[in-house]
Image (cartoon, helix red, strand yellow):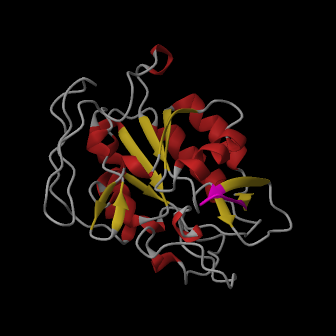
Amino acid sequence: MDNTSIITQVSNPKEEEIISSSQEKVSQSNSSLKKQRSRSIFSTFFCCFRSYNVEPPSSNNNTSSLPPPVEENGTLPKPPTKYLLPEMNISDYGKKCVVIDLDETLVHSSFKPISNADFIVPVEIDGTVHQVYVLKRPHVDEFLQKMGELFECVLFTASLAKYADPVADLLDQWGVFRARLFRESCVFHRGNYVKDLSRLGRELSSVIIVDNSPASYIFHPENAVPVQSWFDDMTDTELLDLLPFFEGLSREQDVYSVLQNLRSR
């Protein structure tokens, strides 16, 4: 297996080694410059939205059958018998579900050594153990702790579990993520791994996805809170800046009205 297929991420333009697959992350954020402090944290709502007609599940029962995933070759595989998420914990009743991406949203990982890596995760590939160097985005600890208080949080990444699961173990010291979903839970559509929110088993009007890749939420752009791709800028404050917005969103009945208002500004 090629190393580049383990981690799903857009490549860092500062690195010579390209560790992402062009099929797995949208590259349009690669050339973006460091945003100025005065730039609105919601400016990313004004681009990259595309409408797809995806029928939401008719029930929130986890034992109901899922809508069949869209396949690039036009065939429809047999749908799973359960939704991706288990029953909601009693402690999360009344909370909205926030789906959070991993690579370039919370961390940046590379097979190329990083001198200031927060974690070094060994990953076995074809019988050989490779070291993956992981750098945490600034304020990620505060972000996760607060999000865990406000929402039912789910990690959803298009990376493989053999890499992402141990990274999540090290990153989430507080048990914020109620569930972890990996590449096999994505739908491969038009060359991208898409996170189909209708397959979660939660009411779509109470689901938010936080992701740096518009391709990841192309089925449900109206549920998205886009973030800038992050590589190594230690002055970045995006996660911290988003917390007041999420505090307000946690008190809203319907996420669509809030996110639509942001997009229409």
Residue 5 lies, with reference to residue 217, above or below; the image says below
Question: Residue 210's x, y, as percent?
Answer: 47, 52
Q: Quadrant of residue 106?
A: bottom right
126 in the magenta segment: yes
219 lies left or right of 240: left
154 in the magenta segment: no
Compare residues 236 and 132 and report the one nearer the observer.
132
How many numbered badges does the structure rendering display?
0
Compare residues 3 and 232 and report the one nearer the observer.
3
Question: Residue 181's x, y, as percent?
Answer: 46, 42
Furthest residue in direction right, as rendered: 115
Q: Residue at x 36, y 65 (%)?
A: 215
Residue 28 seen from this side: yes
Q: Residue at x 64, y 77 (%)?
A: 34
Furthest residue in direction front, as rendered: 127
Q: Main secondary structure of the magenta part?
A: strand
167 lies left or right of 48: right
Compare residues 194 and 82 and report the one nearer the observer.
82
Question: Which image quarter holds the C terminus?
Answer: bottom left
Residue 22 lies, with reference to residue 251, above or below; the image says below
Compare residues 139 and 61 and report the one nearer the observer.
61
Residue 118 lies, with reference to residue 49, above or below; the image says above
Q: Residue at x 54, y 31 (%)?
A: 150
Question: Residue 35's x, y, as percent?
Answer: 62, 75
Question: Residue 191's x, y, as percent?
Answer: 32, 71
Which stretch is magenta?
124-130
Q: Residue at x 56, y 62 (%)?
A: 7
Residue 265 seen from this side: no
